[in-house]
Amino acid sequence: MNKSRGKPDFEHFQHSDAPNCDAHVVHLDNVRSTQAEILATSKAKQIAEVFGILADPNRLRLLSALASQELCVCDLAALTKMTESAVCHQLRLFKAMRLVNYRREGKNVYYSLVDSYIINLYRSVEEHLEESNL
């Protein structure tokens, strides 16, 4: 980990002694059999955008709060110890990616997750981290 920023030190991974091929031979059978399975570039970009949105601890905390119930901005701000303005900014990003729904009730706006797929993804990663003690 890069201690100054709390992020993984990717340079270390890039310069490690990872094994590589000594002979540069393309195995056409493997390429042909896998070609139909590889993500299309457009789909890969869409998925990368979702992962980009999820690549923020505050956003993940907001999603985890919304996983249990519908909440208003004030509740989300209190739960995450963020300002209401910061919560609204993050929720706008979620709305743009179609990850949350909202409804008005008087002067309050309540947010909920569109579906359980995103929360299942985050929980799967959480379980993986617990199992591998990362």
Image (tube, grey):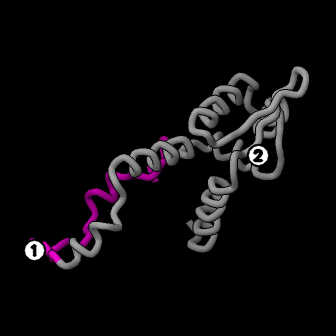
Question: Dot 1: what SS?
Answer: loop
Q: Residue at point 44% right, 47% down? A: 48
Which residue bears the numbered disc 2?
Answer: 66
Q: Residue at point 33% right, 50% down? A: 41
Q: Residue at point 58% right, 69% down? A: 128
Q: Decide: few, some or many residues near mark 2? Use Cα within 10 Å; few <14, some 14-19, many ≥20.
A: some
> On the rendered structure, is 128 left or right of 102?
left
Position in image of residue 4 (x %, y %): 48, 42
- Is residue 102 positioned above or below 70 on the image? above
Mark 2: amino acid: Leu
Q: Is residue 78 visible?
A: no
- Is residue 71 positioned above or below 27 on the image? above
Front in this rendered view, residue 56 or 27: 27
User: Which segment did they paint magenta?
Assistant: 1-28
Q: Residue at point 37% right, 46% down? A: 42
Mark 2 or mark 1, which has the lower sequence index?
A: 1
Question: Dot 2: what SS?
Answer: helix
Q: How many marks?
A: 2
- Whether residue 18 is in magenta: the answer is yes
- Looking at this view, name the residue that lies furthest to the front: 36
Q: Is residue 110 visible?
A: yes
Dot 2 and dot 1 residues touching (CB under 8 Å): no
Residue 25 is tagged as 1
The answer to which image quadrant residue 39 occupies is: bottom left
Front in this rendered view, residue 79 or 6: 79
Position in image of residue 97 (x %, y %): 57, 38
- Is residue 46 positioned above or below 122 on the image? above
